[in-house]
Image (tube, rainbow, N blue to C red):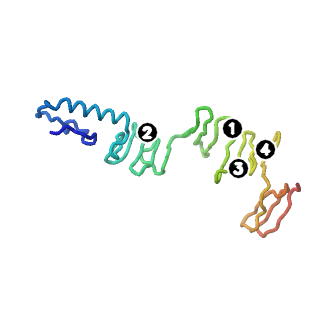
Amino acid sequence: MAVPTLITQLSPVIASNVPAGSETVFPDLDDYIRALSAFIAQLATDPVVTGNTVLGNATTDTLVVGVSGLVKDASGRVGVGTASPTFTFQVVGSVGNVASFGDGIRNFVMNMGAGVVSIGPTTTDAIALWTAGVERVRADTAGNFLLGVTTAGTTAAKTLQIANGTAPAANITGGQLYVESGALKYRGSSGTITTLAVA
């Protein structure tokens, strides 16, 4: 039988590989040894061979580490703590910290509590929400909620701080609270604008 030239020609079934038990090894012994050495080198330097994943099941295109501890399914979904992820990336855990992202010093944690899901840094860092690459909202470590600003007033704690905005031109079912030229204003559902506090 011919000496294999591609790693994909090998079989995980021992008896299906060459040379067969009844086949004479010589004079191809050196070719067999060099072929296997080349395949080992491929595994060390190239994790993908002819489009098939070496680590995992090339037939089903899946990967399982441990007893469903880490799963990559055929649809490209990755699951941690679940054998059947239903999202692109899904983490399933018990009550407590279920996910952490960071550099080991500053970590962003998701915590599953009884009746509440908490997210945020474990260090003395603020948390901000961005849209279109620009920070829009921030919660700082003093408990201030900042809308359109990044720094609260000196000594402020547990306050709502709002930057000057653009007055709404249309009504909504509820009401709209905003700051215009330093004055706090409210537009009701009928369009009435009330100045709650002057600048």
Evaluate whether residue 176 shows in this view: yes
Evaluate whether residue 96 shows in this view: no
Q: Are marks 4 and 3 in contact (CB under 8 Å)?
A: no
Q: Element type at marker 1?
A: loop
Residue to which mark 2 is pinned? 69
Residue 137's disc is 3
Q: CA distance from mark 2 to mark 1?
A: 31 Å
Residue flagged by tag 3: what amino acid is it? Answer: Val
Name the N-terminal-most of marks 3 and 1: 1
Name the N-terminal-most of marks 4 and 3: 3
Residue flagged by tag 2: what amino acid is it? Answer: Gly
Q: Are marks 2 and 1 in contact (CB under 8 Å)?
A: no
Q: Position of residue 164 (x, y in %)?
A: 80, 55
Name the N-terminal-most of marks 2 and 4: 2
Q: Element type at marker 4?
A: loop
Residue to which mark 4 is pinned? 152
Residue flagged by tag 4: what amino acid is it? Answer: Ala
Residue to which mark 1 is pinned? 125
Q: Are marks 3 and 1 in contact (CB under 8 Å)?
A: no
Name the N-terminal-most of marks 2 and 3: 2
Name the N-terminal-most of marks 2 and 1: 2
